[in-house]
Image (cartoon, grey):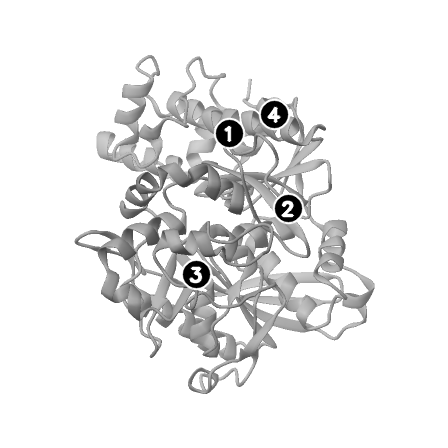
Amino acid sequence: MTGEAAARSAPRRCLVFDLGGGSGRAILADLDGATIELTEIHRFAGYETSLPDGPAWDLGVLFEGVEAGLAAAARAGGVETVGVDSWGVDFALLAEDGVPVDQPRTHRHERGARGMAALRAEHAMIARTTGAQILPFVTLFHLQDWTANHPAEAARARHVLMIADLVAHHLSGRAACEATLARTSGLVDLATGTWAPELLALAGLEAKPFGAIVPAGTVLGALRDDLACLGLGSVPVVVVAAHDTASAALALACEDDEAFLIAGSWNLLGVEVADGGLPAGAREAGFGLEGGVEERAILVRSLQGLHLLRRLRAAWERRTGEDIPFEAWGRLALAEPPALVVPDLSDPAFMDPADLLETLGTVCPALRRDAPGPVARALYEGLARDVAAGLMAIERLRGHPVRRLRLGGGGARDEALCALVARRTGRPVLAGPVEASAIGNALVQFAALGAFPSITAGRTALRAVMSLRWFEAAQEDHPA
């Protein structure tokens, strides 16, 4: 990362907490002149658990991992600020004493589907008011079902905090709702940027537990005394672009004629647009409008992603006893000719398949499944076909072409995904950075420290020096 402001500044260091559904990481981000370097110092998992009624989050395990990350940062020499990003939509409700009134459930809990069905008549209004995609994991639908069944606990709620906001509250003792993360809830009015009273009523809660919505770059407060003593001292906790998608989009730094694909367990395809109303036809095309930074928004569509490759690996091992490493599946796919049968991954059967090989056999009975290569190729081509269809929809919605695609996240390492997306979409793919969310998180912290005059200036500097791999649209995608 470069820029005159960065070049003039002394070396700076911040601590990034990048939380995913499977694991969380504490990462040191060092800015020294023209370079930003990331060093993972602690990784923790085990905070996803199961209750009799469904999947849930263990906050004790989550907070222990975060605190271990603080201690690791202190041992590494300290930092100037701390910031947290996480996945969207999931939340916790805290009582007056700061204790959760109920253990948080995950977005995969079946209550979301029940709430979505109960509010079917309101879907068009919800999408129009908030820009949210109408999907069962949206916070509003989970709250609707939960409050209907837990009125006593709902009455005790004094704070509703999304996951990164919850961790920031744990770190600083102060409650605030970061704008990009709040926008994932389906409860924020696009026109005002504040909580929508009519939607809070649908959720079954009063307005009081929903605190102030603050922008990325806000300094929340100092690290709590009992956590400062872990060795970092009273460093500031900075509110970053706390939705990991927004942080990643920030780091990818797309130009106006580019789209992005944040490729991980799920593929998030989108473009940055001026904040405002949902474009005509966007909802019907499966797109929603999520929060960005500095008066930008993200027009985005959620697609199936690389979690299906993990499901394929597990199913293949169960069926054959052969454990093929995750990274080998892409090589197997590229060694195959183009697939004759490509699955439609938008089929609901692929949402949470218990046995992916069995699901593929049901949905695509003509697909060859007796060898790993053909099924891997078909699956990758299914992912690429979804991206191509989404890009065509973006062009229709915006009225001008997408010149190329910037692909970040873990999928930027995957040669097969990058090559087949380039081939299927007919656009060059610029792959990188892999650590897009962590870089976006750090960028906001460095801007808050004054290393850049603004977040936008920082991302412009980042774009100029970003190291990317280029995949041509017409490149050969399998060896001779």
Location of mark 2 (residue)? 276
* Amino acid on which the number 3 mark rests in the picture: Met
Q: CA distance from mark 4 to mark 3?
A: 33 Å
Q: Secondary structure at mark 3?
A: strand
Task: Say few, some or many: other residues with alpha carbon within 10 Å of mark 2 (under 14 / 14 to 19 / 20 or more).
Answer: some
The answer to whether 312 appears left or right of 259 in the picture is: left
Q: CA distance from mark 3 to mark 1?
A: 27 Å
Residue at image x 42%, y 70%?
66
Q: For residue 284, which numbered disc appears in the image?
A: 1
* Amino acid on which the number 2 mark rests in the picture: Gly
Please provide percent x and percent y for residue 365: 30, 15
The answer to whether 39 appears left or right of 145 in the picture is: right
Task: Say few, some or many: other residues with alpha carbon within 10 Å of mark 3 (under 14 / 14 to 19 / 20 or more).
Answer: many
Location of mark 3 (residue)? 162
Q: Please, is residue 227 above or below residue 130 in the view?
A: below
Depth-wise, is mark 3 or mark 1 nearer the camera? 1
Please provide percent x and percent y for residue 475: 64, 24
Going from N to C along the chain, the mark reached first, 4 or 3, is 3
Towards the viewer: 399 or 456: 399
Please provide percent x and percent y for residue 74: 51, 79
Task: Say few, some or many: other residues with alpha carbon within 10 Å of mark 4 (under 14 / 14 to 19 / 20 or more).
Answer: few
Q: CA distance from mark 2 to mark 4?
A: 22 Å
Q: Is residue 436 visible?
A: no
Location of mark 4 (residue)? 392
Q: Please, is residue 33 above or below residue 261 in the view?
A: below
Going from N to C along the chain, the mark reached first, 2 or 4, is 2
Residue at image x 55%, y 54%?
437
Q: Is residue 139 visible?
A: yes
Q: Are marks 3 and 1 in contact (CB under 8 Å)?
A: no
Q: CA distance from mark 4 to mark 1?
A: 14 Å
